[in-house]
């Protein structure tokens, strides 16, 4: 069974003076539904190189939760972890998928700016685009739980795959590396969407990504 490592959000518990790593149990359930073995990562960036060297994962998932610090977030350790995982993914050509905050980290890593948007928190959104050659024309309703987004991608190596009707970029891929991002949470679809399961399988099968 292919191993997939995934990041966790940071919860700050002031009464205990603790910063806790945690993740929705549905994330592991979604990864299992895709046919992969889920392995959570702590937000200890100093250990991540050794973890990847020892586990040799087939893929990396950057999950949701915690805004980036430059956009008001309170978890700098997550920013460091996401950036390091992206660097490793690029260097080692490990397939990487980021959703919600994870896609924001991808955009930030490749030099794209985010901005505040309204009407994209705890709602359903109709998207349109083209996920070809993996899923063909894209026209579906997905969940939306974010306050920051990108309206126009400038980096020529990033391809926009899906947008909302009000012009928010909702899915991207890198044209040179097997890196994919969506602004919706696949684990929050009930039941899990076949399109999301196929998307992750295509990514790990080497069918989503560039040729460099």
Image (spheres, rainbow, N blue to C red):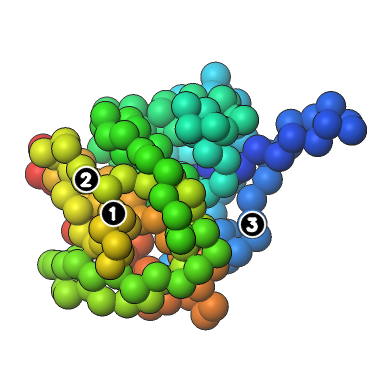
Crowding at mark 1 (Cα within 10 Å: few <14, some 14-19, many 20+): many
Q: CA distance from mark 1 to mark 2?
A: 7 Å
Q: What SS does tag 2 mark?
A: loop
Mark 2 closeness class: few <14, some 14–19, many ≥20 residues within 10 Å: few
| First reached walking from the N terminus: tag 1 or tag 2 | 2
Q: Which residue is mark 3?
A: 24
In this rendering, which labeled residue sits more in front, label 3 or label 1?
Answer: 1
Q: Which residue is mark 2?
A: 152
Crowding at mark 3 (Cα within 10 Å: few <14, some 14-19, many 20+): few
Tell me if residue 84 comes above or below residue 139 in the rendering: above
Report whether residue 206 is seen.
Answer: no
- Residue under the image location 32 percent in, 77 percent down: 140
| Residue 141 visible at all | yes
Q: From what the image shows, is residue 120 above or below residue 115?
A: below
Marks 1 & 2, CB-CB < 8 Å contact: yes
Alpha carbon separation for disc pair 3 and 1: 25 Å
Residue placed at 45% from the left, 55% from the top?
118
| Residue identified by numbered label 1 | 169
The percent coordinates of residue 191 (x first, y second) are 52, 80
Q: Identify the residue at horizontal 34%, vertical 73% (top origin).
A: 126
């Amino acid at each position: 069974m292919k191993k997939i490592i995934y990041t966790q959000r940071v919860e700050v518990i002031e009464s205990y003076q603790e910063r806790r790593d945690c993740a929705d149990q549905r994330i592991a359930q979604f990864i299992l539904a895709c046919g992969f073995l889920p392995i959570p990562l702590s937000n200890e960036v100093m250990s991540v190189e050794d973890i990847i060297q020892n586990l040799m994962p087939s893929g990396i998932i950057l999950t949701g939760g915690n805004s980036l610090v430059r956009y008001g977030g309170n978890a700098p350790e997550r920013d460091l972890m996401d950036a390091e995982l992206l660097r490793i993914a690029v260097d080692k050509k490990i397939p990487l998928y980021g959703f919600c905050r994870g896609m924001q980290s991808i955009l930030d890593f490749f030099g794209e700016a985010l901005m505040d948007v309204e009407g994209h928190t705890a709602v359903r959104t109709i998207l349109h685009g083209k996920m070809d050659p993996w899923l063909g024309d894209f026209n579906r309703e997905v969940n939306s739980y974010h306050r920051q987004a990108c309206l126009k991608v400038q980096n020529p190596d990033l391809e926009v795959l899906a947008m909302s009707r009000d012009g928010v970029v909702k899915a991207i891929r890198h044209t040179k590396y097997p890196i994919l991002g969506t602004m919706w949470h696949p684990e929050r679809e009930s039941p899990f969407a076949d399109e999301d399961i196929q998307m992750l399988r295509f990514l790990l099968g080497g069918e989503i990504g560039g040729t460099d």
